[in-house]
Image (cartoon, grey):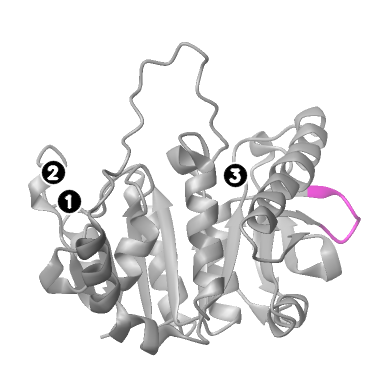
Amino acid sequence: ARSAKRGTSRATKGDEIKFAPADSGDDDVEAAELPLEQRAQALAESLPALARLRGSVVVIKYGGAAMVKSPERTIRDVALLGALGLKPVLVHGGGRVTDADTMEVVAMVLMGKVNKGIVATMGAAGVPAVGLSGVDGGLLQAKKVDDEELGFVGEVTGVKKDVLKAALDKGLVPVVATVAADAEGNFLNVNADIAAAAIAGALDAEEFVLMTDVPGILRDVKDADSLISEVDEGGAKRLIDEGVVAGGMIPKVTCCLSAIDDGVQATHIIDGRRPHALLEELFSTKSSGKQGTTISKC
């Protein structure tokens, strides 16, 4: 098992499953259908990235608005990665304060309804997937956090990658719910950002993608045009020191740095509210206007 070198920070908010109220007035932004010529051009321009990433492991943390607004769209985008010859691993989960009663519900929802719903949607798209949790085969090794007020929240101590590699070798897309178990067999709710980063590092993934509800790292949080599209790990650390990266963005950037420390080549923070943001980030070129933030090795 590979230990989690960083990632014991307790990011317990902003990662929970969110449900839109029935009368929600939030508009779901849909991508306008492009003319055939533009679609063909976009496909042609993506060929260098496709060739580079074919056969590579890409770990995607799925959550936030992407799980609420048109969730099937993101799941089908992940399925498309598999159809194109990449090896995607989809990670979803919780991370909130969890008492004993809530933990039972979290385990049932994450490992049952949510996980199997994702697997079923991928199957309908023609891509075979397998639903897993951190409990299966001891995939996620974890221990209960020291803060008793957080209840049954766990921090990752290691990843057994054999279960995931076996699925990938069979051409399956692993879909991982981040519920783990401690040494006594108690379920633990593990922050999905941290778990996904640890999984990416354990698999030596080429790319690690965090789907969020923000455009990426903004130099000025009030100015959407101040997006920092690319930065190396040293630059990302300086942004934290300078206070540019602050609040809830700190644990997300820290997760990316943890994955890079563990061998991942590039990490991405993207806005899951954007239609097909995952495909856009992985396959578009810098000149075509990437919309997320890429943090890469120095």
Residue found 26% across the figure and 69% down from its top? 40
Q: What span is in magenta?
A: 182-187
Q: Which residue is mark 2?
A: 224
Q: Secondary structure at mark 2?
A: helix
Q: Is residue 172 above or below residue 169?
A: above
Q: Comparing marks 2 and 1, which lies closer to the viewer?
A: 2
Q: Is residue 61 above or below residue 64?
A: below
Of 82 and 181, the residue lying toward us = 82
Nearest to N terminus: mark 3 or mark 2: 3
Instruction: Provide the major secondary structure of the magenta segment.
Output: loop
In the rendered image, residue 98 lying in the magenta stretch gets the answer: no
Mark 1: amino acid: Leu
Kindly tell me whether residue 166 is visible in this rendering: yes
Nearest to N terminus: mark 2 or mark 1: 1
Q: Is residue 187 left or right of residue 178?
A: right
Disc 2 crowd, CA 10 A, few/some/many (<14, 14-19, 20+): some
Nearest to N terminus: mark 3 or mark 1: 3
Q: Comparing marks 3 and 2, which lies closer to the viewer?
A: 2
Q: Position of residue 97 (x, y in %)?
A: 63, 35
Disc 1 crowd, CA 10 A, few/some/many (<14, 14-19, 20+): many
Mark 2: amino acid: Ala
Q: Which residue is mark 1?
A: 218
Q: Secondary structure at mark 1?
A: loop
Residue 105 found in image quarter: top right
Residue found 50% across the figure and 23% down from its top? 20
Kindly tell me whether residue 297 is visible in this rendering: no
Query: How many marks can you see?
Result: 3
Disc 3 crowd, CA 10 A, few/some/many (<14, 14-19, 20+): many
Q: Which residue is mark 3?
A: 95
